[in-house]
Amino acid sequence: MDRPHVLILGAGIAGLGAAEKLKNSAVDVTLIDKHNYHTFQPLLYQVATNLLNADIVGSPIRDAIHEQDNLTFHQTAVTHIDLNNRSVAFEDIEPLSYDYLVLALGAKVNFFGVKGAAEHAFPLYTLADSTRLKNQILARFEMTEKDPSQIEEGALNFVIVGGGPTGVEISGALAIFVYHDLVKDYPGLDVEKTRIILVDSGPALLQMFKEKSQVYTKSKLEELGVDILLGQRVAEVSPSLITLQSGETIKAQTLVWAGGLQANPLVKELGLELAPGNRVPVGPDLALSDHPEVFVAGDIGMISDGKTAETLPQLGSVAIQTGHHAGESIAHQVDGKTIGPFKYLDKGTMATIGAGAAVMQMPGGRTLTGKAAFLSWGAVHLALLGGGGHRASALVKYGFALFSGKRSSRIVLDEEAD
Amino acid sequence: MDRPHVLILGAGIAGLGAAEKLKNSAVDVTLIDKHNYHTFQPLLYQVATNLLNADIVGSPIRDAIHEQDNLTFHQTAVTHIDLNNRSVAFEDIEPLSYDYLVLALGAKVNFFGVKGAAEHAFPLYTLADSTRLKNQILARFEMTEKDPSQIEEGALNFVIVGGGPTGVEISGALAIFVYHDLVKDYPGLDVEKTRIILVDSGPALLQMFKEKSQVYTKSKLEELGVDILLGQRVAEVSPSLITLQSGETIKAQTLVWAGGLQANPLVKELGLELAPGNRVPVGPDLALSDHPEVFVAGDIGMISDGKTAETLPQLGSVAIQTGHHAGESIAHQVDGKTIGPFKYLDKGTMATIGAGAAVMQMPGGRTLTGKAAFLSWGAVHLALLGGGGHRASALVKYGFALFSGKRSSRIVLDEEAD
């Protein structure tokens, strides 16, 4: 009965990855998440643009316990983490003490203080975010169909902030959704008047990619009908007007925020010195320097690649590898062994643009663009999606949408009674 | 430009059925619904018990316009119907006049004045209802897993009111969901303590079926673990206690209301004499006697089968046939022709119990029970589900769940930001 207790906070890609590696260990694992579902965040933009259903991108966390006898799951929110007493308090269960802690609580959107953004922008980090954005998009079209004068009020203008992978992917997918699918749904509406505007403060899209990919991405997005504003920042967001720092204004009722993340605010109470975006700095083994029993994985951490001391981006591929490393480290320590420091294995970074176009930054600096990158992207993401049922179902829908251009879930379901 | 204008209120099974039959007519059709999706109500209980996803049972209404050039759709709510001036007013578009009107606005749940039911019961008539019930069921289990004393408070007691097809289907599906699926999700919880109690005021379940089917249904449901209380009525509902008219009380936090319908309240302003449940009485041609240009179809109508003068039940099979008849009548009138009165073609009435069990009341009084009825049921409902994409996807999920016993969408997605 004195098996070490491993407490994993967060059942995202990192937290589930850590749990998985403890499957055959002589430990008791408790997994905590405030939702009963795991969110596969890399595909949220597909939920927002109606290509995948929310319940494919969100899968039941309890599926994991079917395959892991030493795992208990509680759906609850963390309220306080006491590193010195090795204890965590929760919203509606008794506090739990731990021998090992995995901090995998993820992040939330960082609006960087842009006025009105918290109230009026549409972020894209949670499953609820993606559904809300989809409903917002469809509601703009239903409204405009009834009152075309709303076009002049910017109802069909969509501004996306942030030219990283999320911003590129949502822009491309939205362009295809609108110009390819919705145009058929609203024959009486001048759907071609829709404007999709991608804004980034830097000199290029996808700044982590090579120039060739950046140029390709920009030209492909423009082909799809996306306007790209580089070197521009959004200064203020209101329900119907976007103001840029240049003073220029854009009438738009929908601003999608893909502009960056900040770590889960709970980290502020840890008594640690935090990195920019509140990320938690970790040692080479992913543990806290003063608390070797506490491991950090995924978006919440400030994690180096283990080679060049460069900070790794907040991406799914980093989450899964850091989660695995944290789990393996604990498994080894319990067995009285050690493993080396975390080393990120670069399998390539991808962004899909849509309609057969994608870019892939290969390890070693090679760049892949076009259909080959697109297919790699599809394969990688489908392989990452959890559960046999999900994978099969996602494959069916994915293939169906790709090959027929038909999408099946553009319904606006409100939870209110009617 | 003087093509007759057909206004169809409601895009349920009846409304879409009417629209379809006007596809090749020289008319302009306007279809109105307050949602942007069509709800296939016969399968709502499957959404609530996690067997099908909400976006399979709800399909985009705009799909219909792809196949019908003379059809316009507006998502808006009807606020007033003026039969004398042949005009209908809406929430957010200008009033529309019509040459022909199809009243297919459906019904809503009838709580028959049971105290507390409107506030605390879970009806099962809309897509939002089904999602809300699913979330309620799953939340009871998550809560009890954290605090097993909630079992004593009735958290795992589920009371279903109404022994018609809906009540039978949700009871059976819930029993399988709980005892077969959820039991694996909550290994630390005594899921066997779950009680599913089906209450009906009559002497038997499925009163429209033959006695053989009634007996079979009762015994199959009991095999699945459902307790059946016949000859009992619910008198009062509170968030944690159900009081029967006998004075007996049942601790339960979830009461599913499958106890009957009343027509859309808008009919009260029509100036017509209404039948019980506010249903609109119609002539043999489904038109209003004083307004031959107004046709009534689906759950909103008090419709005779055309042979025995017996009133038809509020079922999908009646909705589709009355919708088709209304559409065909208008198409014929526009062409200067007439068609005969509405005759209901009895193709059999079915109720599925689950786990390979179902009953089917065949035309002419024959009864089919067991696996054959179950498979017929599946085939009929899948054939009725709209759209190629949906059908394929539903088939995949349906087959997958049947053969593997695994369900894929038991996630609780709230729309609030997090």
Image: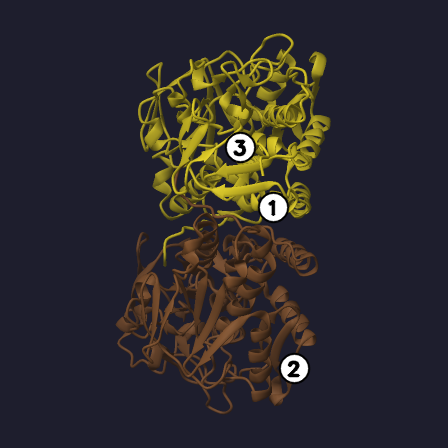
Chain colours: A yellow, B brown
Label 3 lies in what chain? A
Q: CA distance from mark 3 to mark 2?
A: 53 Å
In this picture, is A398 found above or below B220?
above
In the rendering, which numbered label is found on residue B387? none
Residue in the foreground of this view, choosing between B254 and A21: A21
Q: Is residue B86 visible?
A: no
Quadrant where the C terminus of chain B sits is top left
Question: On the rendered structure, is A28 left or right of B141?
Answer: right
Q: Is residue B186 visible?
A: yes
In this picture, is B106 found above or below B1?
below
Label 2 lies in what chain? B
* Residue B305 locus on image (x, y percent): 50, 85
Disc 3 element = strand
Disc 3 designates what residue?
Answer: A8
Amino acid identity at mark 2? Leu
Disc 2 element = strand
Quadrant where the N terminus of chain B sits is bottom left
* Residue B294 locus on image (x, y percent): 38, 74
Mark 1 vs 3: CB contact within 8 A: no
Q: Residue furthest right?
A: A372
Disc 1 designates what residue?
Answer: A63
Amino acid identity at mark 1? Asp
Residue in the foreground of this view, choosing between B180 and B186: B186
Disc 2 designates what residue?
Answer: B368
| Residues at marks 1 and 2 on the same chain | no
Marks 1 and 3: which is nearer the front?
A: 3
Question: On the rendered structure, is B96 left or right of A279?
Answer: left
Q: Residue at x 67, y 15 (%)?
A: A340
Mark 3 vs 2: CB contact within 8 A: no
Disc 1 element = helix
Q: Residue furthest top?
A: A308
Residue in the foreground of this view, choosing between A12 and A91: A91
